Amino acid sequence: MTTAGHTNHADHPEQAGQTEHTSHPEHTSHPEHTGHPEHADQAGMVSVESHLAAILAAIKPLPPRDLALADALGAVLVSDVTARWALPSFDNSSMDGYAVRASDVAGASEQQPVVLPVKGEVPAGDTGAYRLVPGSAMKIMTGAPLPADADAVVPVELTDGGADQVAIRQAVPAGASVRRVGSDARPGDVLLPAGTRLGAAHVGLLAAAGLASVQARPRPRVAAISTGNELVEPGGALVPGQIWESNASMIAAAARQAGCPAQRRAIVPDDTDAVLAALREALPTADLLVTTGGVSMGGEHDVVKATLASLGTVSFRKVAMQPGMPQGFGTIGPDATPIFTLPGNPVSAYVSFFLFVAPALDALQGHYRERASPVQAVLTQPVRSPAHRRSYLRCLLDRAAGEVTPLSGQSSHQLATLARANALAIVPEQVTELPAGASVDVLELP
Ligand code: AMP
Ligand code: MG
């Protein structure tokens, strides 16, 4: 936990950069910080990378669970799934037509059709045991079991479609239009190897193989909790001093966009007992918790920080970034569930989710990889940035032109600017201004 004595929110560009930092670069190690795991810089801030590294070091992949197929999309297999039965499990027709012996229709042609008596009909789902009488045909539908002693199906298009007898206008080889038992998979075949992230076709295959559930590492379930006495449910009326709650809706949506099921929990007032109760209620059905608000530097009103600090498993840091400087991360509950306490300003919360929570969601799935690496683009306008903090500026990236235009309205309450942006341009910690024409790293937003 950092202790530097800033009391400003420092989440607004207007305020940022006015603090008393001196010009030490991010990773300089200072004697007074020897042994500090995160190499905090002189202002008590840790770098974005250090914070992310601490998060990833603490997160273990979720244990696999038995997931009903309805919950399996996006889950990752931890072992091979093998076929228990042949697929298909019986020879069946791939066409609507007539089951025959190929040898009986060998001489058929347009000019000289072979006429066979039709001895019955086999629709899909008919489980009767049929045997084809040599020299006859049986009407058969797609998916219906091939009668014993038949070895081919003549598609209805190659016949006159007759009911009592059928004129067959073309010879077909043995095996024609027949799906053989085991032609999709044989018992013991690996249907899906360990490591597969289950997509729609994979879920389909599991069902086709007769499985109702599968053992897999699930998508983490996210619970988004907002705190603040000023927050009002959208749709209701406001009185001055109140705002409509937006963070929890946004964070839940961002989690879903990252492929994870997410719940937006009820708004929590700035009250320790209420915060604790909300966390306790959310824990049983969540694999990762995200709170917003109540973690800045303002003292007794920062109820999330006060509440969690007393548990001792969540640490609060200042991360050298803007927006999003006050960050908390740790674990709570019997399963050591990861919890992120994000700052309350909506843009800070969103950028924090993007930089820290989204990688944590990957790590919980055992699939952590570097997220989309930044692209380079040229600034169309000059930008300013506070010293010692890495700025993530909402901007419009034109990939084709290789240009990036910072948007006006970069304060961290300005959600409208975020909604207009398609990317974040990065201004490094040691840089305080850049001219138009400078090249910057840009992260595309999902
Ligand atoms: P806090 O981090 O609680 O001090 O909040 C910082 C700023 O973010 C304040 O202006 C809050 O009103 C605002 N804020 C906090 N939580 C939310 C939320 N869930 N939705 C919208 N704005 C919020
Ligand atoms: Mg608050």
Image (cartoon, rainbow, N blue to C red):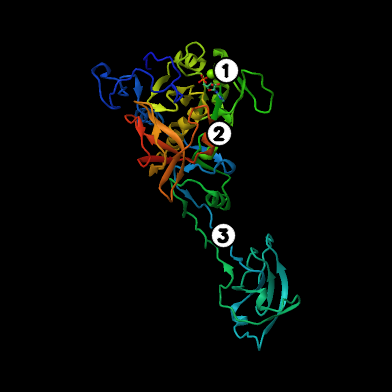
Res 373 seen here: no
Instruction: Where is residue 155? Give x, y as percent.
Output: 64, 73
Tag 2 residue: 416
Q: Residues within 10 Å of mark 1 (few under 14, many from 20)?
A: few
> Which label's residue is closer to the chain start, 3 or 1?
3
Looking at this view, is 300 or 339 the one in front? 300
Q: Can you tell which quarter of the image residue 164 is in?
A: bottom right
For the residue marked with disc 2, what is the amino acid? Ala
Secondary structure category for the residue under label 3: loop
Looking at this view, is 71 or 437 the one in front? 437
For the residue marked with disc 3, what is the amino acid? Pro
Which of labels 1 and 2 is toward the front? 2
Left or right: residue 147 versus residue 322 is: right
Secondary structure category for the residue under label 1: helix
Give the numbered dot on residue 88.
3
Q: Residues within 10 Å of mark 2 (few under 14, many from 20)?
A: few
Distance (Cα) linking label 2 and label 3: 54 Å
Q: Residue furthest top?
A: 300
Give the numbered dot on residue 14.
none
Instruction: Where is residue 82? Give x, y as percent.
Output: 48, 51
Instruction: Where is residue 435? Give x, y as percent.
Output: 36, 37
Secondary structure category for the residue under label 2: helix
Distance (Cα) linking label 1 and label 2: 32 Å
Q: Can you tell which quarter of the image residue 73 is in?
A: top right
For image coordinates 57% across by 17% down, the residue present is 277
For image coordinates 30% across by 23% down, the residue present is 39
Tag 1 residue: 277
Considering the image in quadrants, where does the N terminus appear? top left
Ligand 1 positioned in quadrant: top right
Q: Determine whether label 2 and label 3 are within 8 Å by CB.
A: no
